[in-house]
Amino acid sequence: MHTEEIDYDQVLGDYRKDPYGYVDICTPHTGQIRFNVRLDDKVEGITGKWRHIPGTKLSVLTREGNAKPVFATSRGVISYIRDDLEGQFVEAGEKILTIKHPLKKREIIEQILRKVLLPFPAPERAKYFFSMEIQSRIEKFGQRSISIKPGDELFTMSLMKRDTPVYYQGDPGIIHSVYFQPGVSVDQGEPLVGICPPDKAPLIEKIITRVKAEWE
């Protein structure tokens, strides 16, 4: 979607009708499932200064005698639950819960920007870090002052104890949004950053300004 094609009234109207975000929780591996929550229960997400305190325990998967808990990743209310699976053996990747939470102004802006910024996806499931040069420039000038062009070394990909440089491929622009945490695994195809071409910067600011002004 191009920024010029956005119908701001419709987009904001849609969010006003359903001002919630929905986080699906899937089983990380196979096992027999037991739920610790019910429909409409309130849950807490990950907290702590270093995000070291796990969220509410949602369920437990038992495989080969080993019980492994599944925790909430977001604060909210359980809006969907596969309680028909209670005590059953489930496969990995099975959707078992959905957490609904009220969207904050910042989250609405981020969701709209994800539709208009140019994403740079992770080439493989791995851990990522900005290249040393890019990181140094970010620390000195801020990420939105960093211009990149095709061929620039943008990331270091850490996979199987090997570090590999990742070069930017895409239209020139600035690093507007960062979607990953250094050292945390990112799935293949998930966006690492959102790039804003120079000529789109005024339109991006228009989005941010309008949401801030019109969203309570």
Image: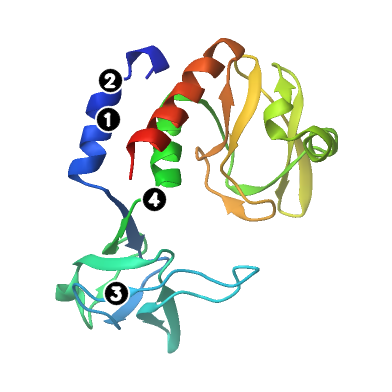
The answer to whether residue 126 is left or right of residue 154 is left
Alpha carbon of mark 4 to alpha carbon of mark 1: how far?
15 Å
Image height of 117 relative to 159, above or below: above
Name the image quarter holding the N terminus: top left
Residue 42's disc number: 3
Q: Splitting the image into 4 quarters, where does residue 74 fall?
A: bottom left
Answer with left or right where residue 11 lies relative to residue 193.
left
Residue 62 image point, x, y percent: 38, 83
- Residue matched to label 1: 11
Query: Rounded to the nearest whole Å, what is the CA distance between mark 1 and mark 2?
Result: 6 Å
Q: Which residue is mark 2?
A: 7
Residue 136 visible to an observer of this rendering: yes
**Among the two numbered marks 3 and 1 on one chain, the one whose residue lies closer to the N terminus:** 1
- CA gap between label 4 and label 2 equals 20 Å
Instruction: Report the Cα–Cα distance between label 4 and label 3.
Output: 18 Å
Farthest residue to the left: give it: 84
Q: Cβ–Cβ below 8 Å for labels 1 and 2?
A: yes
Residue closest to the eye, 170 or 77: 77
Q: How many marks?
A: 4
Query: Which one is in front, 107 or 216?
Result: 216
Determine the residue positioned at 76% across, 22% down. 152
Q: Earlier in the sequence, mark 4 or mark 1?
A: 1
Q: Position of residue 127 (x, y in %)?
A: 66, 50
Q: Amino acid at mark 4?
A: Lys
Specify whether 50 is left or right of 201.
right
Q: Is residue 155 above or below residue 57?
A: above
Residue lying farthest to the top in this orientation: 199
Classify 10 Å Cα crowding around label 2: few (below 14), some (14-19), many (20 and above).
Answer: few
**Residue type of the residue flagged with mark 3:** Lys
Q: Tell me the element at label 3.
A: strand
